[in-house]
Image (tube, rainbow, N blue to C red):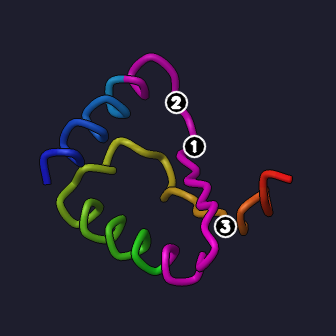
Amino acid sequence: MPWAVALFGELRRMSEVRRFKLVFLLEAPDHRKARQELVEVLELVTARGFLDFLDSPPTIRTTGPRHVGWF
């Protein structure tokens, strides 16, 4: 999971400068499935200690796509 190492390593460095709350916003047509997948990934990276720098667990917000078409 090299992407997680890079992403959460950078977030860890950012938190050393200023503490923050991590919020993921999912915009997906089938946001229930995408949310479940994100929950599973976050559980995995939490178990591996990638999020141990956070004061509280990340929040997940979901919404459908904002645009319906190009017309």
User: Where is mark 1, residue-wise?
Assistant: 21
- Observer-nearest of 40 and 58: 40
Amino acid type, residue under disc 3 in the picture: Thr
**Is residue 58 shown left or right of residue 71?**
left
SS for dot 2: loop
**Is residue 23 shown left or right of residue 16?**
right
Q: Position of residue 14 (x, y in %)?
A: 41, 24
**Is residue 23 shown left or right of residue 39?**
right
Q: Which residues are magenta?
A: 14-35
Give above or below for 42 relative to 30: above
Amino acid type, residue under disc 2 in the picture: Arg
Residue at screen point 52% across, 74% down: 35
Question: Do tag 3 and tag 2 residues touch (Cβ < 8 Å)?
Answer: no
Q: Is residue 64 magenta?
A: no
SS for dot 1: loop
User: Where is mark 3, residue-wise?
Assistant: 62
Give above or below for 33 relative to 56: below
Nearest to N terminus: mark 3 or mark 2:
2
Amino acid type, residue under disc 1 in the picture: Lys
User: Where is mark 2, residue-wise?
Assistant: 19
